[in-house]
Amino acid sequence: MATEGQQHPIKIYVLIWILLFVFSAVSYASDFLDDGVFRASVILLFMILKAAFIVAIFMHMKWERFALIFAILLPPLALLVLLTLMAIEADYAWATRVEYMGEPIAPEPNPPPTHQHKESGH
Amino acid sequence: MTEATVPNQESVFTSTARDWSSDITTFKGVPWGKAMMWIFLVSDTFIFTCFLVSYMTVRMTVTDPWPNPSEVFALAIPHELFGWQFLEAPIPVPLLLIAIMTFILISSSGTMAMAVNMGYQRNKKGVIWLMLATAAFGASFVGMQAFEWYKLIVEEGIRPWGNSMGAAQFGSFFFMVTGFHGLHVSAGVIYLVIVALRVGLGHYDKTNFEIVEITGLYWHFVDLVWVFIFALFYLW
């Protein structure tokens, strides 16, 4: 059987390499942002971008036949079900601990200063 | 996916249905070793996801505060080296070592991709040196991880069953997730060196050097897992 190799110009690898460096730098820079939805979305966005470029270009998934792509990339989607179920379960377990075991709600490690003195008139 | 990658201009769904339904090779043009490596990587994906999902579950469930990773893993730039003082005082930088480790692993992925390219050009010297460079990056990654573990265990007193900074589960998840990943990197370094040596000894001269691509798949996967650990454990 003829096996065709995954041969692509070296330029694209260098380009993705640089891109991954930039993405990592942005990910790291997100550590200096304030906690919140924006920071969480930056972390998740660049995590997914990096993962996608590694799988698509470095692992050559972009150029494989769909029979292989489906076989490899579809099964991990089942993990999203696990993720959802465990998130629901964890939320319930946490609420139970607070409600029935009298455990204190975790204080924020570093409360932002805006909580101390709320602006009046709003 | 562009049309150019689909032979005969038939839809990807038609071609996939034909590949899977006929009594012939399903993964056409894919060496069996590569298909097997991909299936192994899928199973490894499930293992690492189970770790990360259980970490999420525990972190959402604890009522003690979770230790702040950017403080736990902060590293200070020294203000003097060998008696030569060049700064007023040490500068603490959050996640400094982790950031360096991240860039090292990405660089190793880059050299690995180059090695695969050299393999299909039948440039054996290029393959060997780029794979050994990848292995060297990987070994330095493991070395930095050992330093990080030492710092956490000896200097900060973090144990799998507790620590002085907050939720007791922090240590167990840190050691389990990074330990399992470090094990993968160590195994990958050994794998890379063995394959590089065998390329040098001429074991693969009659093949298309797809073994380099298979080794590369494993190595890129190790980098891929680190992307998720870095985002979800260290940055979150």
Image (spheres, helix red, strand yellow):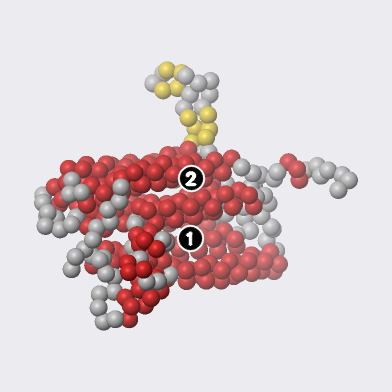
- Mark 2–mark 1 distance (CA, rounded to whole Å): 22 Å
Q: Chain of mark 2?
A: A
Q: Amino acid at mark 1?
A: Leu
Quarter assignment of residue B105? top left
Residue found 63% across the figure and 66% down from its top:
A91
| Chain on which label 1 sits | B
Q: Residue furthest toward the front?
A: B9
Q: Residues within 10 Å of mark 2 (few under 14, many from 20)?
A: some
Query: Tag 2's secondary structure?
Result: helix
Q: Is residue B48 left or right of residue B32?
A: right
Q: Position of residue B109 (x, y in %)?
A: 34, 47
Which amino acid lies under the numbered mark 2 shown in the image of this protein? Phe
- Residue at 26% over, 49% down: B117
Residue highlighted by disc 2: A23
Q: Are there few (<14), some (14-19), or many (20+) residues within 10 Å of tag 1?
A: some
Q: Element under label 1?
A: helix
**Horizontal placement of A42 versus B225: left or right?**
right
Residue bearing the label numbered 1 = B52
Which of the image's four quarters has the N terminus of chain B?
Answer: bottom left
Viewer can see residue B23? yes
Confirm whether circles 2 and 1 share one chain: no
Instruction: Mark yes or no: residue A72 visible.
Output: no
Name the residue located 40 percent from the left edge and 53 percent from the top edge. A54
Left or right: A77, with B209 as reference point: right
Total labels drawn: 2
Q: Which one is in front, B3 or A115?
A: B3
Query: Residue B27, percent across and down?
Result: 29, 70
Q: Nearer the viewer, residue B153 or B112?
A: B112
Residue drawn where x is 59% and y is 61% of the image: B60
